[in-house]
Image (cartoon, rainbow, N blue to C red):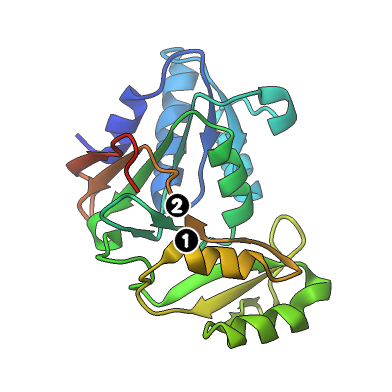
Amino acid sequence: MTIVERALELVEDGATIGLGSGRASQSFVRALGERVRSGAMRVRGVATSEDTAVLAREVGIPLAPLQDAGELAVTIDGADEVAPNLDLIKGYGRALVREKIVAASSRQLIILVGEEKLVPKLGSRGKLPVEVVPFGLPLCERRLRDLGCNPVPFQKDGKLFLSDNGNYILDCEVAPMISPNQLEQAILAIPGVIDTGLFLGMASVVLIGEDTDFRLIDERRREKGQR
């Protein structure tokens, strides 16, 4: 069994679910689309990015806007780092704000990752994405440097990249974090910051697969009160 197949088992027929972004999430969306087209499952999806929305339509998954969806049963998404307590860093795919909104709108957040994404402490891969309002870019860069997070504006095709929300993404250089909560609060206090790629206390289940083929090798659940 793969992590995608296991995730499909955790989705109830008739549910409205969040559809994440990234390689593992795209594999899930394609597999879910096969179930929908065959009539084996009825679901509605809320996409976390425009790219995911395009893919969902291509494979036949009906989409709903978040304002019409109400509380979502579950969101299936990926992550860039997973700490032992299931805290996450997300956003390397540049959809962090919509991903966090959709995750927060869900009763459960199920994360699909390859084993290379497991880290002893958040920040081990050295990067934390932060989404900022374009007008506030100079201030945000200055304040982030003051926090010791050297910010590098993400560019694509030689231009500053715009998120689906029309904002810039700063890739902040970070060390393994002793207190992710404190760093998150310090960054969010900067005027112009929309959100960070820290997803703390949000993941309900993490399904871990082999790097190459996503064969399920571990399933971890957050215990009540776990941080």
SS type, badge 1: helix
Q: Is residue 144 above or below residue 161?
A: below
**Mark positioned earlier in the residue sequence (2 or 1):** 1
Label 1 neighbour load within 10 Å: few <14, some 14-19, many 20+: few
Residue 49 appears in view? yes
Q: Is residue 12 above or below residue 215?
A: above
Label 2 neighbour load within 10 Å: few <14, some 14-19, many 20+: some
**Residue 154 position by quadrant:** bottom right
What residue do we see at 54% from left, 34% from top? 18
Pointer 1 residue: 181
Q: Residue 33: x, y in percent?
A: 48, 28
SS type, badge 2: loop
Cβ–Cβ below 8 Å for labels 2 and 1? yes
Q: Residues under labels 2 and 1: Cα distance?
A: 8 Å
What residue do we see at 51% from left, 43% from top? 20
Q: Amino acid at mark 2?
A: Leu
Which mark is drawn over residue 158?
none
Describe residue 2's horizontal placement relative to residue 108 as left or right. Answer: left
Q: Amino acid at mark 1?
A: Asn
The quadrant of the image that shows the N terminus is top left
Pointer 2 residue: 200
Of badges 2 and 1, nearer the viewer stands 1
Q: Residue 43: x, y in percent?
A: 53, 19
What residue do we see at 55% from left, 76% from top? 171
Describe residue 227's horizontal placement relative to residue 30 as left or right. Answer: left
Q: Nearer the viewer, residue 224 or 92?
A: 224
